[in-house]
Amino acid sequence: MSKPGDIVYFEGEFVAREQARVPITTHAFNYGTGCFEGIRAYWNAGREHLYVIRLREHVERLLRSARILHLEPDPSLTASRAEDIILELLARNSYRQDVYVRPILYKSGSTIKVSLSGIATDFCVYTEPFGDYLDIRKGLSVMISAWRRIDDNAVPARGKPTGAYINAALASDEARARGFDEAILLTGDGHVAEASSSNLFLVQDGVLITPQASDDVLVGITRDCVMEIARRQGVKVQERRVDRSELLAADEVFLSGTGVQIAPITTVDGRVVGDGEIGPTTLAIQQEYLRLVRGESDDMPNWRSLVPQQAATVPGFQRR
Ligand code: PMP
């Protein structure tokens, strides 16, 4: 009896998870030469629908990361094709719960040579049942990390290179070892960038502020959702450079990301944010975000791709 998640996409086919193995000589395993996405699908029990959130934006960012990193997948892997593969994979796994989807483009060739060009690239996708990654009903405690966010001139911050997540892991391990829930990373020149794997927002005098894209942040898709929701709620939004001490003085602070969703922060470096409670702007955005992604509201229909109830019945899968 197979479990949801047992079927994966690997080397051009849907196969059992245990069949999807790479040799130890794989370039991506040796040098971290891949890029990936983290995508969520939410189960709406009332409608019996599984919705993938902002699928088009995620596959487009994946293909953009690949261009930045000289990962050259087969030209047949267009954004539409990648979307179809992901929807088909979810259908074949018969999920009736929330899911995390992990597509990866990686250097599958075997060579010691440290290079990006001229090495074969492959595409794989796996999925897993996934609940809350952090407890978003309570306020999180964060610290400003001693680790700095990767500099765009060293490792492209706009891509999602697999190897770059050493940076995120160092910072989040440091935070947890010191008893905090999460780490905030500064840029090399000491401005606020983001958390280990999520973007950061603060609210000051009713204005929603987030570090600008050119401050080495990953331009998050949830970040975009947050700004859209805030504007629709009549909140003024600013993308700009954020100083470290602004974080300490803010009325509200929260994180956004596919994994963390909308996660309120109530202490930064041991200082209480605002009055120590989850702020009204954070709460309003969090509630609206969760309603939209679960399809409890019909607004923003373009944010939700419906997973087909039935897997394609043909052996050589084709949807479009
Ligand atoms: N920053 C980093 C470093 C991340 O890994 C992520 C998660 N993909 C984010 C921000 C949030 O991005 P998104 O909202 O697109 O998930």
Image (cartoon, rainbow, N blue to C red):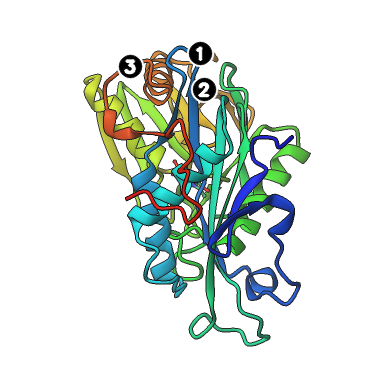
Figure quadrant of residue 182: top right
Task: Name the residue tied to disc 1.
Answer: 275
Residue 47 visible in rendering: yes
| Residue 259 on image: x %, y % | 54, 36
Q: Secondary structure at mark 3?
A: loop
Residue at the disc numbered 2: 273
Kind of residue at badge 3: Ser
Whole-angstrom CA distance, mark 1 to mark 3, is: 31 Å
Residue at 22% in and 23% down: 232
| Element on which disc 1 rests | loop
| Amino acid beneath label 1 | Asp
Query: Residue tagged by mark 3?
Result: 297
> Where 320 sits versus 281, above or below?
below
Measured along the vertical axis of the image, is residue 1 above or below residue 167? above
- Quadrant in which the N terminus appears: top right
Q: Nearer the viewer, residue 254 or 24?
A: 24
| Residue appearing at x 72%, y 58% in the figure | 19
Is residue 218 visible in the rendered image? The answer is: no
Q: Earlier in the sequence, mark 3 or mark 2?
A: 2
